[in-house]
Image (cartoon, rainbow, N blue to C red):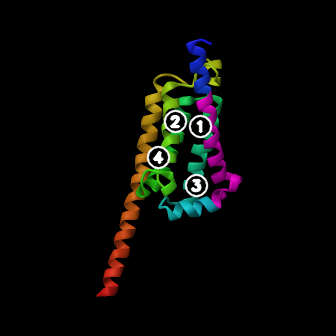
Amino acid sequence: MTDHDRRDLGLLLLRLGTGGVLVAHGAQKLFGWFGGGGIEGTGKAMESMGYRPGRVSAGTAGLAEAGGGALLLLGLATPAAGAAAAGAMAGAAAVHAPRGFFAQEGGYEYAASLGLAATGLAVAGPGRLSLDHALGHVVDRGWMVPAALAVTGAATAVVVGTRNRRLAREREGRQEALFEEVR
């Protein structure tokens, strides 16, 4: 087995594992499969986490996970697929960050790992065992990597920043209400 063969097989395995997990998580959000809440239940959960409107947030996160994951599985449009999945995982990591790093404590470890794997695939490319390779890399050009990551990074920063500001305002409002009750 040549070094190229090993690299391509490794990228295929990483794409299949990462993409498969992302598809399953997206299907939970979109369709309620695998014990998920579907759009309705996930929308309510997203609202409680500060992502509003909840149904739109659930649909967007579900599409980024399921769509990005499916494209990673296939090795198609890898820069955009990896960036979309990484953006969704950054949003998930923001929810879990207050609980620390480790997943057993409810931390962001799992979301960060999936996001970094998706980003790594966006940067490294899908390898020769992919649809991108079979199609001559028409949707996997070098310039697409920084473009996809920059657009996704900017959009994620806006969404997570808006959520964090909203949650801070809500906390301040609750503290003021408690202060008024005491007075």
Specify the quadrant of the image occupied by residue 7: top right
Q: Residue furthest bottom?
A: 183
Neighbourhood count class around disc 2 (C-alpha, 10 Å): few under 14, some 14–19, many 20 upward:
many
Span highlighted in magenta in the image? 13-40
Camera-near label (1 vs 4) is: 1
Q: Is residue 137 visible?
A: no
Of residues 85 and 139, the one drawn nearer to the viewer in this rendering: 85
- Contact between marks 2 and 1 (CB within 8 A): the answer is yes
Query: Which residue is labeled 3 in the image?
Result: 58
Q: Is residue 162 magenta?
A: no
The type of residue carrying mark 4 is Ala
Quadrant occupied by the N terminus:
top right
Residue 34 lies, in percent from the top left, at: 70, 52
Q: How far across and how far down the image is residue 101, in percent?
A: 43, 50
- N-term-proximal mark, 1 vs 4: 1
Q: Which mark is residue 18?
A: 1
Sequence-first disc among 3 and 4? 3
Kind of residue at disc 1: Thr
Q: CA distance from mark 4 to mark 2?
A: 12 Å
* Pointer 4 residue: 90
Tell me whether circle 3 and circle 4 mark residues in contact (CB < 8 Å): no
